[in-house]
Image: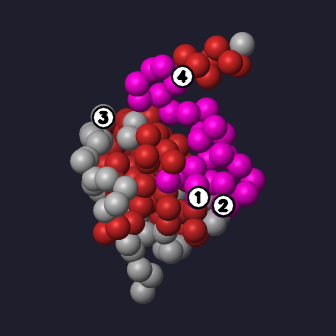
Amino acid sequence: MLISVTLACSLVVGCVGMGQTRDARSGNPLDRARAAVTLADQRDTEAVHALVDLLDDPDAGVRFYAIGALRRLCGNDFGYRYYADAVARQISIETWREAIRRGELTLTDNRRDDLASITDTAP
């Protein structure tokens, strides 16, 4: 059964890989950060949901990669700063979730080699 689900998933264009979404929920922050990068590389609107969830991660490094991935995918950050306090981050996360609910997000043409899309220095 797992083989057929994996095969079916790989044949559907834009399907978020089962491993990437599992890694995004891993107990290891490094796995979650890697999942953020991999999800962005999928260039799939469904990846946005998992990435927005990672914006609330307890690890600042994971949040850094998640917002960088979302900037690459959507061309926006809605004021989110990975280093901000929890209240400020939550406001931006809710803005992301509202944009998803309203169907306002579209994928941009930013590519992985666009380093400016993941650069955000803390004050």
Q: Earlier in the sequence, mark 2 or mark 4?
A: 4
Q: Quadrant of the N terminus?
A: top right
Residue denoted by label 3: 103
Image-based side of 94 in relation to 28, left or right: left
Cα–Cα span, label 2 and label 1: 5 Å
Cα–Cα span, label 3 and label 4: 24 Å
The crowding category of the residue bearing disc 1, from other C-alpha atoms within 10 Å (few below 14, some 14 to 19, many at least 20), is: many
Q: Earlier in the sequence, mark 2 or mark 3?
A: 2
Q: Nearer the viewer, mark 1 or mark 3?
A: 1
The crowding category of the residue bearing disc 4, from other C-alpha atoms within 10 Å (few below 14, some 14 to 19, many at least 20), is: some
Residue denoted by label 4: 9
Image-based side of 119 in relation to 66, left or right: left
Question: Which residue is located at x 50 percent, y 66 percent?
Answer: 64
Q: Amino acid at mark 2?
A: Leu
The numbered mark at residue 33 is 1
Q: Quadrant of residue 77?
A: bottom left
Cα–Cα span, label 2 and label 3: 30 Å
Determine whether 23 is above or below 62 in the image.
Answer: above
Q: Decide if residue 81 is in sight here.
A: yes
Q: Label 1's element?
A: helix
Q: Earlier in the sequence, mark 3 or mark 4?
A: 4
Residue 59 among those drawn in magenta = no
Q: Amino acid at mark 3?
A: Gly
- The segment highlighted magenta reads 9-37
Image-based side of 86 in relation to 27, left or right: left
Q: Nearer the viewer, mark 2 or mark 3?
A: 2
Q: Nearer the viewer, mark 1 or mark 4?
A: 4
Q: Amino acid at mark 1?
A: Ala
User: Residue 88: x, y in percent?
Assistant: 46, 68
The answer to whether the residue labelled 3 contacts the one labelled 4, judged by CB atoms less than 8 Å apart, is no
